[in-house]
Amino acid sequence: MRVLFAALLLQGISMAITIDSIQDRPLLLESDHKLPIVYMQIVFLGSGSISDDGLAGLASLSADLLEEGTKKLGATAFAEKLEERAIRFGVNVGQETLNINLSSLKAQFGEGFNLLNSLLSDPNLTEKTLVKIKEQAIGELSRKQSDFDYVAEDGLREILFEGSALALPPAGTVESIARIKLDDIRQFLKTAITRDRAVVLFGGDITQQEAKTYADAILKALPRGSVKEIKFIAASDAGKVKTVVKNSEQAYIYFGAPFDMPSDSEESYKAGVASFILGGSGFGSRLMEEIRVKRGLAYSAYSYISLGQTSSTFKGYLQTKLESQEEAKEIVLAVIKEFVQKGATQKELDEAKRFLLGSEPLRNETMNGRLNRAFGDFYRKKPVGWSADQLQKIDRLTLKELNDFIAAHSEILRLSIFIVTNGASDR
């Protein structure tokens, strides 16, 4: 009954989403008239940190500049106009996309839309603004040098993707941010914020015709541009281990390996189940059970599989006492090796099914959740509702099918490891 309910709920969600087009660009819409709120998102494909082109942090800093309002109004007056009408606006950057978000009460959405339109035609591209956002970015990056999780994650990225665009930290470095000039941001925005890269999402108290009218207006205001080809970058399977010494009170161990599966694979649901069992289910996970519960060696231990168009990886991390970092690292390797060789148990599969089938529908209760799920299906070039099919496949998954899948992905044994420690284990 739980599975049937979950599947029916997700099917209902998929039926509420419509896909249309305007100006030859996709338009995803879910009308929901229960509350007088309108939500809009413009996703620019291929305009994320992968577009930094050797200048780490360029996409992130460009997004920061877009949040500084228009050149005419300036940051303060622009923010005041948003605040006095309770309009929410933001720009964020992922690895593959740049996203502009706008939401408000329906009565104020027209004003918010006009502000967004003016921003895209007249961003606050001034030296004064650049100095401000660079100082903020450099200050944040400087603070992160004492965040050892950040240091370890950054270090793992470098050894997994050495020599490629993915080796660069998305937020940049103090040195790279200092080098960014106004012309760099101007050129980035000219290339990244274009019609041919845009996908428009609308949700809430808005009709299909209203959504098309708004989308048409915003797309007409954008330059035509060109589509950026997203190239897949394979993670290293060299199994490198690197240690850096910091003034830390515990050891931070980050590990990763390639995961040989494209993001649109029909078997991605198996990866989700395997990932949940091995390291994604908190205290119920294999890693947490073996490392913390049984041996008390880690404060936390986690792993996950990430499938994207630019990369597909298996990653994880743990924090442990300085004196036990070598033992903890060896146990991680042993646990993963045993998982690949022997697979999951029937109990683990049953528990994973109960959790995944019960929690997935809850993630789609909000309008944003449903739109994001629909965009995820679209981004993988799948029909809306593909996620519901994945859920039903989880319900039908047998232990043999799962364990055959796990055994076929022995590439996760070729782990690269990055450790932040203060060297206490070596003394």
Image (cartoon, rainbow, N blue to C red):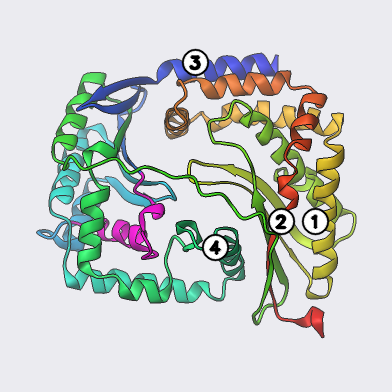
Instruction: Tell me, for residue 415, which label it has, or none.
Output: 2
Q: Secondary structure at mark 1?
A: helix
Instruction: Tell me, for residue 252, which label it has, or none.
Output: none
Closer to the camera, 352 or 362?
352
Where does label 4 land, which residue? 162
Q: Secondary structure at mark 4?
A: loop
Q: Is residue 51 magenta?
A: yes
Mark 4 vs 1, N-terminal side: 4
Three-letter residue code for mark 1: Val
Residue 158 place in picture, x, y as percent: 55, 64
Q: Nearer the viewer, mark 2 or mark 4?
A: 4
Q: Secondary structure at mark 3?
A: helix
Residue 44 place in picture, x, y as percent: 32, 42
Magenta residues span 46-69
> Would you say 120 lies left or right of 175 here?
left
Instruction: Tell me, for residue 332, which label it has, or none.
Output: 1
Mark 2 vs 1, N-terminal side: 1
Residue 3 place in picture, x, y as percent: 68, 18
**Residue 135 in view (yes/no):** no
Distance from disc 1 to disc 3, alpha carbons, whole Å, reads: 41 Å
Distance from disc 2 to disc 4, alpha carbons, whole Å, reads: 15 Å
